[in-house]
Amino acid sequence: LLYYQEWTRLKQSGITCEEEAKLMYGMIYSMKSFVNKISPTDIRDGYMHYKTNKNALHILETSSGLKFVMNTDTASTGVKEFMNQFYLKIWLEYVVKNPFCLPEKPITSELFKAKCDEFIKQSTFYGGIKSV
């Protein structure tokens, strides 16, 4: 887990952030495996989403295997494009190009955190974002 932040989460899970991250990783791994086996087409753009009657889970996986995960309400639209823009405008600019952000280490950059928060809050679906 490189970075985690909540915005409008209404219900707490009752487990630690680390435990929640492990559960999320396991679910994403299982979902990806399942979708790859039953889908009539390949997942080419690295984007998957899973929707229930109460929320939606969005996953963007880069070609290097880095996963961006957002949990939103079901009314949120344009999340795929938003996640792509987040990767290009925030992640690449404030993490990849930052010599103090080391690969596979948790992100501690206050500038990244501020830009992330600003980018999220400017989205059309800000109120529906639970966590990223």
Image: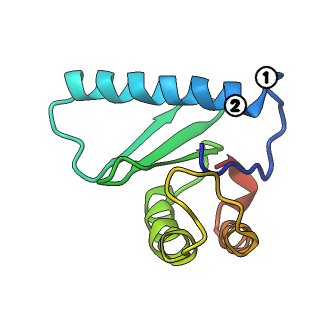
Is residue 97 or residue 39 the one in the foreground?
A: 97
Q: Quadrant of residue 118?
A: bottom right
Q: Residue at x 57, y 29 (%)?
A: 24
Q: Can residue 52 be spotted in the picture?
A: no
Q: Position of residue 19 (x, y in %)?
A: 69, 24
Q: Can residue 87 be spotted in the picture?
A: yes
Determine whether the residue tagged by mark 1 lies in a helix, strand or loop.
loop
Q: Residue at x 56, y 73 (%)?
A: 90
Q: Position of residue 113 (x, y in %)?
A: 72, 67
Is residue 12 or residue 50 the one in the foreground?
A: 12
- Mark 1 Cα shell of 10 Å, populated few (<14), some (14-19), many (≥20): few
Residue under pointer 1: 15
Residue 129 lies left or right of residue 100; in this view the side is right
- Measure the C-alpha gap from mark 1 to mark 2: 8 Å
Determine whether the residue tagged by mark 2 lies in a helix, strand or loop.
helix
Q: Position of residue 71 (x, y in %)?
A: 62, 43
Is 8 above or below relative to 96? Answer: above
Q: Residue at x 41, y 27 (%)?
A: 29
Total numbered labels: 2
Q: Position of residue 47 (x, y in %)?
A: 37, 48
Q: Quadrant of residue 126?
A: bottom right
Is 9 above or below relative to 20? Answer: below
Residue under pointer 2: 18
Q: Quadrant of the N terminus?
A: top right
- Mark 2 Cα shell of 10 Å, populated few (<14), some (14-19), many (≥20): few
Q: Amino acid at mark 2?
A: Glu
Residue 73 lies left or right of residue 91; in this view the side is right
Report the mark closest to the observer, 1 or 2: 2
Is residue 85 or residue 5 the one in the foreground?
A: 5
Q: Amino acid at mark 1?
A: Ile
Q: Residue at x 58, y 51 (%)?
A: 105
**Circles 1 and 2: CB atoms closer than 8 Å:** no
